[in-house]
Image (spheres, rainbow, N blue to C red):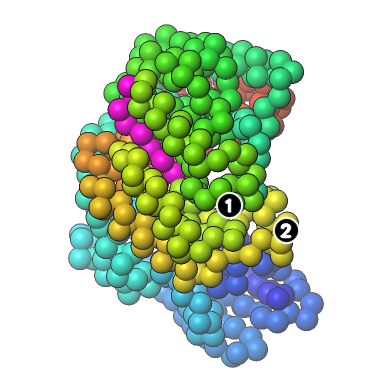
Amino acid sequence: MIIELVTDAQAYFNDMAEEIRLFFGVVEVSKDAVNADLRLNISLTPERKAKGRLMPAGISCEIEVSPDGGDPLERKRQEKRALKLAAYTLLRGISEVETPWGSLTGIRPTKLYRELERRHGTDGAERQFREVFGVSEPKLALAREICAVQGPAVSSAKPDSLDVYIGIPYCKSRCLYCSFGAEVAKRDGTLDAYVAALIEDICAGADIARQGGFRLRAMYMGGGTPTVLSAEQLDRVLSAAIRAYGGFGTELTVEAGRPDTITREKLEVIKAHGAQRVCVNPQTMNDVTLERIGRFHSSAAIEEAYALVRAVGIANINMDIIAGLPGENVPMFQNTLERVKALRPENLTVHTLAIKRSSRLKERLDEYPLPPAKDVEAMLELGELTAREMGMRPYYMYRQKYMQGNLENVGYAKPDAECLYNIDIMEETVSIMAHGAGAMSKRVFPAENRVERIPNPKDVPTYKNKLPQLFAAKRQLFV
């Protein structure tokens, strides 16, 4: 399908294109297509209205831009929302595709809910979710519950609070659906060189944080797969981080990730540094799917790795699973849930498969049939039911581009087992000093409802070469 978007609001072109993809999936949206199947004309008028027309259907709409109060940043926010709503309104008139989150395409629905609640009260926020954005009642209820669970963590964040992220952009193999800038780990000295650069990054970041007067709140080591590192390399990185920052705050989480990288020695190093949370991520407990997606281990190995984490004495375990994997159906997803439930983790994160542009899955979709959207939605409902049967409640959520069924990822946890870092990063209530290739540092300015970011290069050699420039940028942002 060829879709053309004609607009005088070019700064918001990509935002409107995302609305189009809610209905048509991963399609190219052109600024000047020839022989387009659909053409959207959307303009921003001097009277502060987003006017749209869809051809050849001949459908028109007009959306008023909400008052901005004179704040330039808020003015842009409201303009973007009105233009996106115009695109959504036009296409909703011709499409039967269900969009449970209505016109919302952003990563953080709960952050928007909280922002609207501050401005308009709970009733006003819910009214906007329903009537302006078209969010379904079940998704509104999910956002409401998560915000309530997050309340203590969000209210405890201070302007000088800081989380630290340590990124290990390496995996044992690349999964079919992966688009992250993770490299396959090799035995050629690459990891040692990366660890040395990472420790340099950590030491500089800790010094900058001290100069800026920040207080450490939580530390998170993610990836990739951090446990591709040897026990000695893990020890070097964690020792350097805790020494440089003077601790890890109130929480240290390490993504152990894939069972084929987990050993007792590595887990003992992780525990010795005080980590209370470890992630053991099966994605699925169906062996045929594990092989299909490029995870060269068995479901039995996942159970063995889980038992090893318990034996070492780490009390809080998270497990990630994915709904909508190629070739899976609802009974297969139910099998994954039943086997995870039998293990009794403290946290369960239920992801929806996102078809990323740079993944092998996107390139080979004709070879890997995906379950229909209605089945993926049923999988998420089963995920929620199982999590609640395990005594968990939803505590954080985020959405990604190109998710099947326009759905979401939800983290569930037993009371008092929530991951503070997950809440902080999703709600953007706390600044983050991020270390490693592909990691993203953020400075949160709560009084201005503003976030500024510094992305580290995804390519490892480029990251190492640009460390001096990154240190200068961080110093300017954080001090």
Instruction: Please determine whether, in this image, residue 361 is positioned above or below residue 228.
Output: below
Q: Which of pointers 1 and 2 indicates the residue nearer the eye?
A: 1
Q: Residue 97: x, y in percent? A: 51, 77
Magenta region, residue range:
313-320
Instruction: Please determine whether, in this image, residue 35 is positioned above or below residue 261.
Output: below
Q: Residue 454: x, y in percent? A: 55, 33
Instruction: Please determine whether, in this image, residue 111 is positioned above or below residue 300.
Output: below
Q: What label does residue 289 carry, if any?
A: 1
**Chain-order first, disc 1 or disc 2:** 1
Asked if one can make out residue 409 in the rendered structure from this viewpoint, the answer is no
**Amino acid type for the residue under numbered disc 1:** Thr
The residue nearer to you, when weighing 233 against 301, is 301
Q: What element carries label 1?
A: helix
Q: Quadrant of the N terminus?
A: bottom right
Q: Mark 2 points at which residue?
A: 364
Q: In which quarter of the image is residue 233?
A: top right
At x 36%, y 62%, the residue is: 381
Q: In which quarter of the image is the C terminus?
A: top left
In the image, taking residue 65 as reference, residue 289 lies left or right, namely right
In the image, taking residue 423 as reference, residue 402 lies left or right, namely right
Count every numbered label the image shows and give the total: 2
**Amino acid type for the residue under numbered disc 2:** Arg
